[in-house]
Amino acid sequence: MTSWRELQERINSCPECKRVGSGLTLHCEQPPARPPAPPAGSVLFISEAPPPQGGFWTKPSVKDDLREKLIDILHVFLQEQNLSPSGMRIDENLEKFVSMGLFLIQTIKWPLCHSARNLRPAERKLIEHSIISHLVPELALIRPSAIVSLGKVACYACGCMFSECGFSFDQSQKLEAVRGKRFMVKMGDCPDIPVYPTGLPVRQQQRRNNLPRIVQEIKDVLRRHWHTDRKSFGEIIPGADGA
């Protein structure tokens, strides 16, 4: 099986991403920061695309709106579990995020000129290329215990991947019709897993007054998949290794 590192190297050198993304993605001197090897069984967040500054997995000295908001949500959740934030802070160490059974990948692997949430034909073509070439192989290695699709682009990607096995979502639908709900899907030979659609928890949503509801929906997912005994999320899959 292809290793995680090989998958990420394939993304960085993918000529189809550049060809299909022509006019949609920004030129980058350096590829965005790519995620480390994931532990199998993680609760997986899927977002839209990395920003030009490097994205979720870039060094914490570089600001990332999505990372900051997700970490804020996680800290509030941990406080509600009566766990002291000291020793649990992950601002300076994304390895802690991963070791707690959480992971994040982007649907589109390169920064966009503009959001693809309108799902125009060219945008859908780019998303569908990314699904076939990159997302499906990544999911095969991650073997997530749950998926949280953040925003309409990630929701569309999940709809494409799982349309015949538990979750359907196309360009004509509104995110509002599915967000905050749980859809059980089949992924390969894995047990059925839940998909939870919600919005992207970023500052733009605050201007639309959507952020409190998104935060609550993410906290509800964390609560469902929290294991008090081992103080982590997701499921441990013996013998699985995404390195």
Image: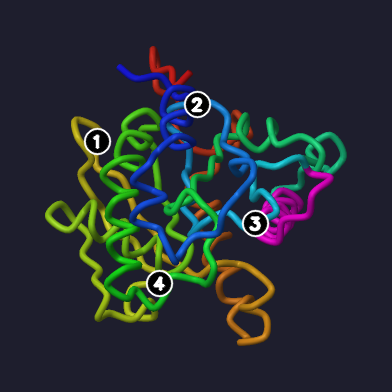
Check contact, mark 1 vs mark 4: CB within 8 A: no
Which comes sooner in the sequence, label 1 or label 4? 4
- In the image, residue 83 above or below residue 217: above
Question: Where residue 42 sits in the image (x, y, percent)?
Answer: 47, 36
Q: Mark 4 points at which residue?
A: 179
For the stretch drawn in magenta, the main secondary structure is helix
- Kind of residue indicated by mark 3: Pro
Q: How far apart are marks 4 and 3 (CA)?
A: 27 Å
Question: Where residue 171 sits in the image (x, y, percent)?
Answer: 27, 75
Which comes sooner in the sequence, label 2 or label 1? 2
Q: Name the residue under label 2.
A: 39
Q: Which of marks 2 and 3 is in front?
A: 3
Report the side of 139 relative to 102 (left or right).
Answer: left
Residue 230 painted magenta: no
Residue that sits furthest to the bottom in the current view? 208
Q: Callout 4: 10 Å neighbours few (<14), some, many (20+)?
A: some
Which residue is located at x 20 percent, y 44 percent? 186
Which residue is located at x 59 percent, y 41 percent? 31
Q: Distance between the residues labelled 2 and 3?
A: 27 Å
Q: Which of marks 1 and 3 is in front?
A: 3
Residue that sits furthest to the top in the current view? 239
Residue that sits furthest to the left in the current view? 164
Q: Nearer the viewer, mark 1 or mark 4?
A: 4
Which comes sooner in the sequence, label 4 or label 3? 3
Q: Distance between the residues labelled 1 and 3?
A: 36 Å
**Callout 1: SS:** loop
